[in-house]
């Protein structure tokens, strides 16, 4: 059966709200130049001023640094992976694939138990290139980003199917098919929507070309207001969203042919032959923001990722059928992408229908921020991020973080703080950035969580790195 209609479905993507070098716990009121794109475009309206750093010797004057109007960077970004199902060693196994293909039967039972009603989430945000220029007329930024993210959350039944396969006791009978394979089946089978309530398996990869503008629109004494907006052209390369919610199974897929996904005998009017790495979707996203500054204090609000992607290549949707007839003995490693294909078989685990297209909403977020600049060395701040919609990839819960940025010397910036939410529990972000060559060249690294290095439960492994950031 082939369907040719277009449907509206939820998109999987995760915000990359921390992938900025030199910042740890708050961004909304302070991040500027091209780094403001995707966080708060209003900050592009900051008019560059001389940066004054006070030296530690009390009898010596401060050091004035020239205005920084032009900023650009290549290959700047980061990744994050966090889980409430794995400890720190398990997360490292996922990253390094050291356990690839080596799960024993006992390992499968243990991992199935660990993942019951739990999961893992990951995101990659890579700024391939970014450039901005700011002056009295405002600030303009152009960016190219690659954004990849995924969420794998299992209920107990889904976890046991994934990691134990046909040995899950839901399957109470065995048979041998014409190929000689052992097939497990249930005498009283249930539908996916009955078995897998709360399960979500989703991932997305899209390319983002952005253009953002911010400008100062009001000045009353020392109080200044800035507004900004950004538009992003999106190319989609991979989209999978399979979930059971409100008693219904929703499963859609649109993946570039380079990945070689097998949908069995299903056909689609949007099928793309071959194995080329080509886009399978396109869309538009919009960011808007406003920032108000006064001596010392700043306040800001922004709304990020308003928009949608239309997937129009290799688009499939799955029907809610009964779960029966499984030959797989379950995942043998943490390579979820490859292992999942082993469980689903040759496209026959789901009953797929082809679609002409599918439209997916972006996970819109509301950001609120405030900061207080105590002096040229020390700034305190806080950010709060709220999901605006409930599509795949939206934050499961609001995220709040607070902390400080500190310049102990003119060429070194340290950031630290505490945060909670975003399905991560309590976390302690930290950052360090070096300003070299008369503060023109900046090198920095950040992490979402230092607690992971002390406590192995609920690990958050992340890194944001930039080595080619220049300001003139």
Image (cartoon, rainbow, N blue to C red):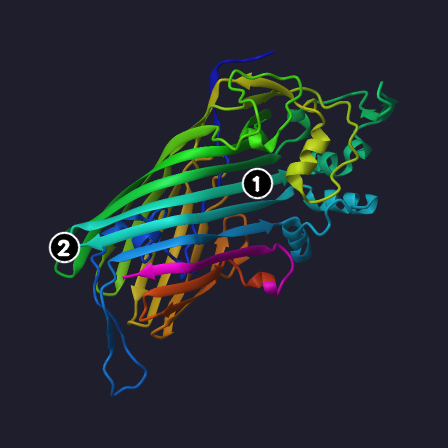
Q: Where residue 175 appears, x then y in whole percent?
A: 87, 22
Question: Residue at 50% of width from left, 61% of height from top?
Answer: 428
Which mark is nearer the camera, 2 or 1?
1
Instruction: Please determine whether, in this image, residue 315 is positioned above or below residue 284.
Output: above
Question: Residue at 52% of width from left, 15% of height from top?
Answer: 269
Task: Look at the image and give the residue range highlighted in magenta.
Answer: 453-472
The answer to whether any part of residue 236 appears in the image is yes
Question: Dot 1 corresponds to which residue?
Answer: 151
Q: Quadrant of residue 64?
A: bottom left
Q: Please identify the quadrant where the C terminus is shown.
A: bottom left
Instruction: Please determine whether, in this image, residue 69 is positioned above or below residue 196.
Output: below
Q: Please state if 252 lies on the left or on the right of 190 as rendered.
A: left
Question: Dot 2 corresponds to which residue?
Answer: 219
Q: Where residue 191 appears, x then y in whole percent?
A: 68, 22
Q: Residues within 10 Å of mark 2 (few under 14, many from 20)?
A: few
The answer to whether any part of residue 417 appears in the image is no
Question: Residue at 33% of width from left, 74% of height from top?
Answer: 410
């Amino acid at each position: 059966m082939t369907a040719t209609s277009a449907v509206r479905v939820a998109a999987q993507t995760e915000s990359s709200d921390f992938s900025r070098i030199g910042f740890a716990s708050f961004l909304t009121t302070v991040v500027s130049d091209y780094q403001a794109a995707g966080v708060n475009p209003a900050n592009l309206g900051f008019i560059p001023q001389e940066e004054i750093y006070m030296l530690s010797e009390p009898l010596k004057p401060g050091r004035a640094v020239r205005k920084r109007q032009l900023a650009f960077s290549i290959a700047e970004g980061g990744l994050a992976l966090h889980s409430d199902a794995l400890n720190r060693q398990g997360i490292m196994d996922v990253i390094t694939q050291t356990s690839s293909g080596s799960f024993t039967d006992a390992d499968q039972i243990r991992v199935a138990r660990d993942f019951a009603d739990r999961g893992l989430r990951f995101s990659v945000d890579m700024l391939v290139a970014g450039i901005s220029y700011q002056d009295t007329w405002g600030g303009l930024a152009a960016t190219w980003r690659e954004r990849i993210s995924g969420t794998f959350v299992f209920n107990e039944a889904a976890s046991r199917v994934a990691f134990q396969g046909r040995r899950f006791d839901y399957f109470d009978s065995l048979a041998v098919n014409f190929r000689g394979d052992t097939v497990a089946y249930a005498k009283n089978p249930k539908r996916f929507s009955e078995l897998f309530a709360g399960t979500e398996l989703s991932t997305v990869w899209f390319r983002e070309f952005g253009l953002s503008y911010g400008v100062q629109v009001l000045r009353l004494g020392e109080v200044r207001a800035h507004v900004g907006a950004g538009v992003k052209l999106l190319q989609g390369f991979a989209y999978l969203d399979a979930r059971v919610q409100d008693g219904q199974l929703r499963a859609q897929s649109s993946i570039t042919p380079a990945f070689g996904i097998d949908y069995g005998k299903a056909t689609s009017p949007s099928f793309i032959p071959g194995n080329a790495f080509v886009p399978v979707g396109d869309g538009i996203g919009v960011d808007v923001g406003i920032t108000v500054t006064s001596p010392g204090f700043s306040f800001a609000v922004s709304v990020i990722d308003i928009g949608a992607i239309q997937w129009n290549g290799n688009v499939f949707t799955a029907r809610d059928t009964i779960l029966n007839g499984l030959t797989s003995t379950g995942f043998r490693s943490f390579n979820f992408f490859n292992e999942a294909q082993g469980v689903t078989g040759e496209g026959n685990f789901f009953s797929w229908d082809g679609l002409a297209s599918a439209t997916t909403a972006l996970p819109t977020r509301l950001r609120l921020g405030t900061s207080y600049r105590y002096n040229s060395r020390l700034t305190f701040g806080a950010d709060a991020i709220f999901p605006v919609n409930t599509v795949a990839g939206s934050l499961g819960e609001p995220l709040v973080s607070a902390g400080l940025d500190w310049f102990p010397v003119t060429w070194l910036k340290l950031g630290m703080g505490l945060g909670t939410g975003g399905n991560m529990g309590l976390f302690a972000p930290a950052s360090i950035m070096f300003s070299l060559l008369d503060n023109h060249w900046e090198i920095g690294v950040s992490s979402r969580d230092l607690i992971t290095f002390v406590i192995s439960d609920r690990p958050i492994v992340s890194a944001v790195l930039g080595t080619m950031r220049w300001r003139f």
